[in-house]
Every structure is written in C-alpha cells, then in structure tokens.
Image (spheres, rainbow, N blue to C red):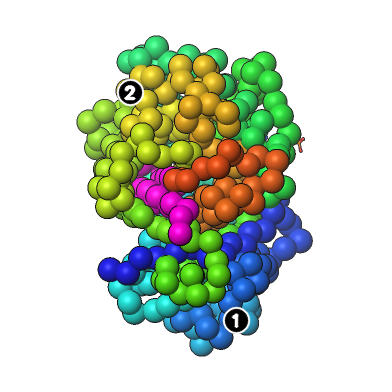
C-alpha cells in the first residue's frame, strides 16, 4: 500500500439551493477542488461520488456519468457510491484505496445531494431504514434517534440540557463557517423550547434538509511533495456495517458500528484516541453526537452528555468536536456529508479554517454514519512532512 495524501478540497455553500441543479452542485465543488489542488483535470484518473438517493430526490440515476460529463470530466472512470448518509465517507475510502493500491495517482472523492427538489425528504430518507420492520410501522429518522435518546437517558441519566449543549456548541462553531446552512448562534432555551419533532428531540436537535456538494483530491504522498503541497496524509481508514434495524441490535443506547470502524482506523494508524486532536462527528441528531463520541472512545459510556455540557467538546475544549458546525448547523446533504467532513479536516490541518481555526492541530478524525448505525466510516488524517 502506498501512502496517500489529500491535496485539495472544494465545496458549495450548504443550504436550500433551489436555483442550483444537482449537476451544478457537483461541478462547482469539483472545479473548486481541482483549482485548490492546482491539478489539471486531464491528470485525473478516476472519481468516486457519494450520493444516497438522487433517484428518489431528483429522479436521476446513472449519476457518475452525468455529473462528470457536466463538470468537464467526460471519459473519466467514475462510480457512484451509496451507503445512505455514509455514502461520502465510503466514496472517500474507495478513492483512498485506489490510490493506495497503486492503480491510480489522481483520484477525486466527491459527494452530492440535492434534497430540496420537490420530493418528500422524510420518505426518501426513510429508505435508509428497514422498510419491512421499521418504516412500514410509521417510524422516521427523528423517531429512530428519539428511541436511542430515550434509551440513553434511561440508562445513563442523559438530560435534555446535555442534548441542547450539543446544538448550542455546533451553532457557535458553524456561525463562523461560510459554508454553513444556518450560520447563527442559538441559546439553550431556543433548543429546549423549540417545536417537538420526536420527543425528546426538537427542531434544533435535528440536522436540516440540505442541498450541497463537496470534493477532495487524493494522490500519493510523494506526488504531493513534488507538487509542493502540505502533506496531509490518510493514516487510518476504517469501515464497518451492522444490522440497520434498531431491534436487531443488542443495545439501543449504543451504536456499535462506530466503535468497530474506529478501532479499525486506529489500528491502521497505530494510534489511540488520545492522539487525536479534533474530530468531525456525525451529529445527524444531538443524541448521535453524544453516542458517537462515546463509541470513538473520547468519553466513557454515559459520559458523552456531561462532556458536551461541560464544554469538553467545544473548540477550546479538551476534545474539539465539530468545529465546522457539524451536520446540525452546517447542514446535512446526506451523500456529501462524509466528504465535507474530510474537507474540514483539510482546512483545519492546513491552517485554512478562518475564524473557526483550531490551534495547530496535527491529527484529525472524521466519522460518517449511515442511517441509525447500519454503516460507518472513520478516517484519520495527519499533517506532516
Ligand atoms: N435546524 C434549525 N432550523 C431548521 C431546521 C433545523 N434542522 N430545519 C428547518 N429549520 C428552520 C427553517 O429554516 C424554517 O425557518 P423559517 O420559518 O425562519 O424559514 C423553519 O425551521 C421551518 O422549516 P421547515 O423546512 O418547514 O421544517 P420542517 O418541519 O419541514 O423540517 C425537520 C424540520 C427537523 C423535520 C427536518 O429538518 C428534518 O427532517 N430533519 C432531519 C433530517 C434527517 O433525518 N436526516 C437524516 C439523518 S439520519
């Protein structure tokens, strides 16, 4: 396996982008990514593009071909990758493996989703849950995570104030992110008094419905050096799947696929969680950030809620989580999210995160999850020479 670096990123602003068609979203991110990397499009050898459900959201399949053609990349070996909300992370892993294997030198990892296009977003998203045993009975994603929240509260005493602390912190960070859908600060009272979506989760416990795209460019580390790029190396790539129905898993208060993917990534990187300087975590709902920080090993089981309330996950805390604003504030265009997380790692590790820049981070981790924990990727990037 060759050492692999990420040498450029490009993103659209996230939000309700009614005027921007699906293909334009991808083209904008891809063109920006190649410009950032300083690599001619003719040098690209392949692309992997994460997208959960363009067929349902936009009536468009055969996605990789139409996106690459429109972005001026016709002829490229390009593949769409689907793993629900972890599609972007899975696309990044495929691109990483292709460069690491020696098969290609320049590979684009992209992600795109246009969720505001007239389709019923709640229905489209629910196709990532178990149709026969969950969706048929009326459950939605807020409902599934509400059950996880209830279990966590029952088992560990997690409180609504702790859930709210996650949203408040992520909005504080995202207010500094020009790509964010809702770049505004909020108070705990706003979260706690908001309209209920699925008790105990209110409007501000939920990630929004978002349009957006993100791309990053990968190449071998020695090629990155020749190009004079800062070396942001992929040191760990973990991927795992699990049963997608909550009742098929032994513990409602846990999401074991996250721990499994994380342990694989830590093992490859030869590090422990103590070596990680900051994380982008899949906070599709506030309870998800709490459980995922526990699964990643940042906190013991049941301590994720108190840690959020005590500021341990703030930008100036011991374990900064979601300096970008996370899915909650930045937005969650499901197929693009995993790649946008990698883009945030690149911005932070290269000192280009602007007002939300962390202090000289060296190792960053991105955790991207499908559905209520049916799939997960964990990637660890390190800046060095
Ligand atoms: N956070 C903060 N504000 C939000 C928001 C969110 N998640 N979602 C919508 N808003 C705002 C809108 O901007 C709008 O504000 P305005 O009245 O000032 O314009 C207002 O709230 C109502 O927006 P609307 O689009 O009508 O909300 P909705 O009721 O249709 O949807 C949710 C709200 C929470 C149900 C929806 O965002 C949702 O389903 N989120 C979860 C997505 C999901 O499951 N993703 C996959 C995870 S696995």
> Secondary structure beneath disc 2?
loop
| In-front residue for pair 43/147 | 43
Q: Quick check: can you spot residue 165?
A: yes
Residue under circle 1?
40
In this rendering, the answer to whether 219 lies above or below 164 is below
| In-front residue for pair 223/13 | 223
Ligand 1 - quadrant of the structure image: top right
- In the picture, residue 13 is in which quadrant? bottom right
For disc 1, the neighbor class at 10 Å (few under 14, some 14 to 19, many from 20) is few
Q: Is residue 368 magenta?
A: yes
> Secondary structure beneath disc 1?
loop
Residue that sits furthest to the front in the current view = 385
Of the two numbered discs 2 and 1 in the rendering, the one whose residue sits closer to the viewer: 1
Q: Quadrant of the N terminus?
A: bottom left
Q: Quadrant of the C terminus?
A: bottom left
In this rendering, the answer to whether 36 lies above or below 272 is below
Q: Quick check: can you spot residue 87?
A: no
Please report the bounds of the magenta region as a residue range. Answer: 365-385
Relative horizontal placement of residue 224, taking residue 157 as reference (left or right)? right
Which residue is located at x 33 percent, y 77 percent? 102
Q: Earlier in the sequence, mark 2 or mark 1?
A: 1
Majority secondary structure in the magenta region:
strand
Which residue is located at x 50 percent, y 23 percent? 312
Q: Is residue 362 magenta?
A: no
Give how far across and how far down residue 379 sits, in percent.
Answer: 39, 51
Is label 2 in contact with label 1 (beta carbons under 8 Å)? no
Q: Which circle marks residue 300 in the picture? A: 2
| In-front residue for pair 15/117 | 15
Give how far across and how far down residue 289 sits, in percent.
Answer: 46, 32
């Amino acid at each position: 396996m060759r050492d692999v670096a990420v040498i450029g990123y490009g993103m659209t602003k996230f939000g309700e982008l009614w005027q921007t068609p699906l293909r334009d979203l991808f083209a904008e991110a891809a063109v920006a990514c190649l410009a950032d990397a300083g690599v001619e499009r003719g040098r690209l050898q392949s692309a992997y593009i994460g997208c959960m459900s363009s067929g349902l959201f936009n009536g468009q399949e055969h996605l990789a071909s139409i996106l690459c053609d429109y972005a001026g990349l016709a002829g490229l070996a390009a593949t769409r990758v689907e793993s629900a909300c972890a599609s972007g992370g899975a696309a990044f892993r495929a691109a990483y493996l292709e460069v690491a294997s020696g098969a290609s030198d320049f590979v684009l990892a992209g992600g795109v989703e246009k969720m505001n296009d007239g389709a019923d977003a709640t229905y489209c998203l629910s196709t990532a849950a178990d149709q026969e045993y969950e969706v048929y009975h009326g459950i939605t994603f807020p409902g599934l995570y509400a059950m996880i929240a209830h279990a966590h509260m029952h088992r560990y005493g997690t409180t609504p104030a702790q859930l709210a602390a996650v949203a408040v912190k992520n909005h504080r960070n995202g207010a500094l992110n020009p790509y964010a859908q809702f770049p505004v600060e909020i108070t705990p009272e706003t979260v706690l008094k908001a309209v209920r979506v699925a008790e105990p989760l209110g409007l501000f416990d939920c990630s929004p419905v978002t349009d957006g795209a993100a791309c990053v460019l990968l190449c071998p580390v020695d090629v990155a050096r020749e190009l004079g790029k800062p070396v942001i190396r992929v040191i760990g790539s973990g991927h795992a799947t699990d049963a997608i129905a909550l009742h098929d898993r032994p513990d409602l208060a846990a999401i074991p696929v996250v721990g499994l993917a994380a342990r694989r990534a830590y093992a490859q990187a030869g590090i422990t969680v103590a070596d990680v300087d900051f994380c982008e975590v899949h906070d599709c709902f506030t309870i998800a950030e709490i459980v995922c920080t526990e699964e990643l090993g940042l906190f013991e089981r049941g301590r994720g809620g108190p840690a959020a309330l005590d500021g341990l996950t703030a930008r100036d805390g011991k374990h900064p989580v979601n300096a970008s604003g996370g899915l909650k504030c930045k937005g969650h265009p499901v197929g693009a999210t995993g790649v946008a997380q990698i883009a945030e790692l690149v911005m932070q590790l290269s000192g280009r995160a602007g007002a939300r820049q962390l202090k000289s981070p060296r190792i960053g981790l991105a955790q991207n999850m499908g559905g209520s924990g049916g799939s997960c990727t964990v990637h660890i990037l390190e800046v060095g020479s």
